[in-house]
Each structure stands twice: as C-alpha cells, then as structure tokens.
Image (tube, helix red, strand yellow):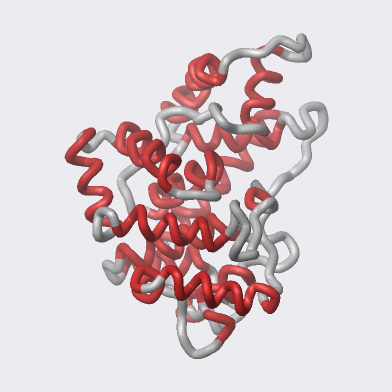
Amino acid sequence: MLLRQIYDSVRRVEYFFALRSRVPDPTRSDPTSKNFDPIRAAIHQLRANNIDEAAWLAFLATHFGTNRRTGWRLVREVYGSLSAGSRWDWHHVRQGPMRFTRWLEANHEHLKGGFGNHRKYMSLKPKSRAGTAQAIESYVKWVQGHSSHAQLLASFEQRVGNDRCKLFDAIYRDMRKNVRAFGRTGCFDFLCSLGKLGIFPIEPGSPYISGSTGPRAGAELLLMGHSGKTLRPIHLDQQIQPLGNELAGAGVKFAMQVVEDAICNWQKSPSQYERFSG
C-alpha cells in the first residue's frame, strides 16, 4: 500500500513539471475567471521574469490551498479583491500590508471559498492569532527585509552557497522563525513549490519529520510497527532519508517530498489503499 502512495506522490510532483512545459491559458492567470489557477499563473509570471509575482502566487496557493469542494476559489477571491477591479498582487500588498488587513476585516465574511486540507485550521478573521492577515503581514515583512524574493535568495546563496538542499534548509529555518501562521507544513510545502516551479533552485534534502504530525506518525509506523515505541524526530529523519535517496537515485524528482507525502497518506489507511489529494 505504501508503494501505491509513493506512486501517487510522484505523480503530484510530476504535475508541476508537466505544467511548466505547457503554454498557459491566459484565463488561468485571471482572477476574474473561474478558470483561475495560482500555480499556472505563477508559471506565467515566471516566464515573464516577474519573480516576485510568481513567488507571491505560490505563497497564496500554499496558504489557502485547493479545496475539494471549491477548488482555488478562495485564492481567486482574495487575489482578485472580490472582482472589485483591482488585485492584491505583490506590488499592492508589499506597499500596504496593513491595507490588505483592513480589506480582509471588511470583506472576510464575503469570501465563499474554502481552505485546502493542509490549511483547514486557518482563519480569515483578521484578529486571529493564526490567520491569513498575520501570515501575509509577516511574510511581506520577511521578504521586504531583503527588498525582493530574488535578493532573499541571493542573501542565502552568499551564506550557504549554491547547494540546493543546503539552500532549502537555510531558507526553511529562517522562514519558520519569521513567518507566522505557517508552521512546519506550510513552510515545507511552500518552499517545495518554489523549487518545483523553478522560482528558486532549492529542494529538500530530508523529509523534515520534526514538527510534523502525519509524516511523523507514518515514519514511526513504518519503522516501529505497532510496538508503541517512538523515536526522536531527528532519528526518524535519519532512518527515513535512505528511502528518499533510493527514489532520487531512481530519477524521482523531489524524492524527499514524495516520501514525506506518501508516508503521511499511507498511515491514514496502512492496510487498504485510499487515494488522497495530498
């Protein structure tokens, strides 16, 4: 059953690379269209060399996620400012993150889309301690501390060099400290998206079990069975990592994310295959 989950996870990663090889439909970048897709929009922006907008769209896609019932509607409603004739694109958000918070306070009850599964505990209420406003305000402050996404990447390249995995780890740790309401899963998923989209030359070098729930449960079940014994997260990472190395050696892209995703889904139903969206 784990092999089937690995296969599904590989397909989800390959989907990003398949999209990058296609010519985007213009409606996919238009938040007034029901066809809007922030991942495809990010690819379109990257092709136009607009790195800031591409990364911002990837951030929104990760923060809100795709809902099983409403799809990307929540991202579309926020990014498109509820079709008010303007957009909360990077240019406007970075100039006034507090203006965005005030807009959210006035309009959050009109947003009809839903959060994705990984973000189901998030809140649109502006005063929530773990909500959209706090995530966006802190993210803008984090990036603006480097002036742009490109400069953020450049500053970490100066610190740790050009190794994809070391870069991922350094940015991940800094993001965890500075971006609120994202946590381990949000930071991991977002940075994987930046890597898969080709926005940043980064890739996880381990499954990042520490701080997780589902992946940790899956790793413990895989390694310890139902013995009731536990391992420290750092040891779980070390013992699961060889599986990711084997997959990478076989040509699997973003093998560590594949492992993290697969064991998380596998532990939900270890004896009977169920297809999960992520």
In this rendering, the count of numbered labels is: 0
Where in the figure is residue 99, as x and y percent of width and height?
46, 75
Q: Look at 76% across and 9% down and name the residue there.
A: 227
* Viewer-nearest residue: 128 or 4: 128
Q: Taking the image as drawn, is residue 13 in sight?
A: no
In the image, 125: left or right of 133? right
Residue 109: quadrant of the picture: bottom right
Query: Looking at the image, which residue is at 52% across and 57% down?
Result: 134
Q: Position of residue 136 (x, y in %)?
A: 47, 61
**Residue at the outermost bottom position:** 85
Residue at the far front in the pictured view: 127
Of the pair 71 and 27, the residue shown nearer to us: 71
Quick one: quadrant of the N terminus? top right
Residue at the image point whose x is 64% and y is 48% from the top: 118
In the depicted structure, whether residue 24 falls above or below residue 15: below
Where residue 241 sits: x, y (%)? 49, 21
Residue 244 seen in the current view: yes
Image side of residue 31 versus residue 116, left or right: left
Horizontal side, residue 202 vs residue 6: left or right: left
From the viewer's side, name the closer residue of 154 and 245.
154
Residue 75 coordinates in the image, percent (x, y): 57, 69
Dividing the picture into quadrants, the one containing residue 66 is bottom right
Q: Residue furthest left?
A: 158
* In this view, 111 is above or below 198: below
Q: Residue at left 59%, top 57%?
A: 131
Location of residue 211 (image quadrant): top right
Q: Say which of 209 and 255 sits in front.
A: 209
